[in-house]
Amino acid sequence: MGEVRRGQDTVPSPNIWHWPEVYEVENRAQDADGEIWRVLGHLVDWSGKDVVDVGCGDGFHLPRFAETARRVVGVEPHPPLVGRARARVARLDTVAVLAGSAQRMPLPDASVDVVHARTAYFFGPGCEPGLAEADRVLRPGGSLLIVDLDVRHRPYGDWMRADLPRYDIVEVDEFFDRQGFASRQVETVWRFADRADLAAVFRIEFSARVAERALAEVVGLSVPVGYRVRHRRRPAGLLRP
């Protein structure tokens, strides 16, 4: 998880920026039973609509949206990941990947129906510019979907808090409440092929000390991990200065 600073376009993501191959393993392990997708699909039907995935990384989620969406755009600030994402979706005619940030998406006003961000940029206070930019590109009635890890959920949340002692989940929840979001807790399972994959992922997600603690506490190849799915719609007739 990165830290949002006011005026900063790009929130560094050391895990995927430095170890994209290991992060691919992590993406494939996450949400093994599809609970996040089930909740997202319950909140918003993107079939035949235009979707943007903000901070799309190397494009892992773009093909899933493209199964039913009319058009899918991935927006990613890190140039090497832009290249990897474009290679991933090269054969998908309805998908494009653009270089840009959550605060400055290279898209026209009111041009999309859904903005999706998963563990990218929208971590609480400080992300107001990105929220405003999402409202700019959304059509009236369009939806902003934010998926973030839930530090209250054990055991993964315990390990996160050990590395982020200043992260205040109450402050974050209150911030999104003030911004008009509904929030839903989602329980998922991360499931790995072997212990080597699990260890590699933990070692890019946590400090060395916490990673070793987590590995000692996990028995087997599955880890329960909680998320918060936050959702709000852009009001019809929203006025901007």
Image: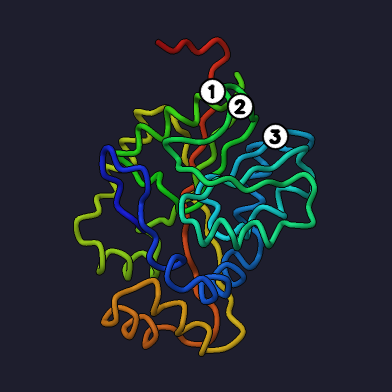
Secondary structure at badge 2 equals strand
> Secondary structure beneath disc 3?
strand
Residue drawn at (49%, 56%) of the image: 79
Residue linked to disc 2: 142
Secondary element at tag 1? loop
Q: Residue at x 40, y 68 (%)?
A: 156
Marks 3 and 2, how far apart at CA: 10 Å
Q: Is residue 45 left or right of residue 130?
A: right
Which amino acid is tagged 2? Gly
Closer to the chain start, of discs 1 and 2, is: 2
**Rendered view: 202 above or below 167:** below
Q: Amino acid at mark 1?
A: Arg
Expressed as whole percent of the image width and height from the top left, the position of residue 222 reads: 54, 78
Mark 3 residue crowding within 10 angstroms, few (<14) / some (14–19) / many (20+): many
Label 1: which residue? 234
Mark 3 / mark 1, whichever is N-terminal: 3
Q: Could you tell me how far apart the alpha carbons at marks 3 and 1 are, in whole angstroms?
A: 15 Å
Q: Quadrant of residue 35?
A: bottom right
Q: Mark 2 packing: few (<14 Cα in 10 Å), some, or many (20+)?
A: many
Q: Do labels 1 and 2 touch, CB within 8 Å?
A: yes
The Cα–Cα distance between marks 1 and 2, rounded to whole angstroms, is 5 Å
Residue nearest the observer in this picture, 98 or 68: 98
Q: Position of residue 29 (x, y in %)?
A: 59, 72
Residue 175 percent across, percent down from the top left = 31, 35
Mark 3 in CB contact with mark 2 (< 8 angstroms): no
Q: Eyeballing the image, is 157 above or below 236?
A: below
Question: Residue at the spot x=30%, y=43% of the render?
Answer: 8
Q: Which mark is residue 50?
A: 3
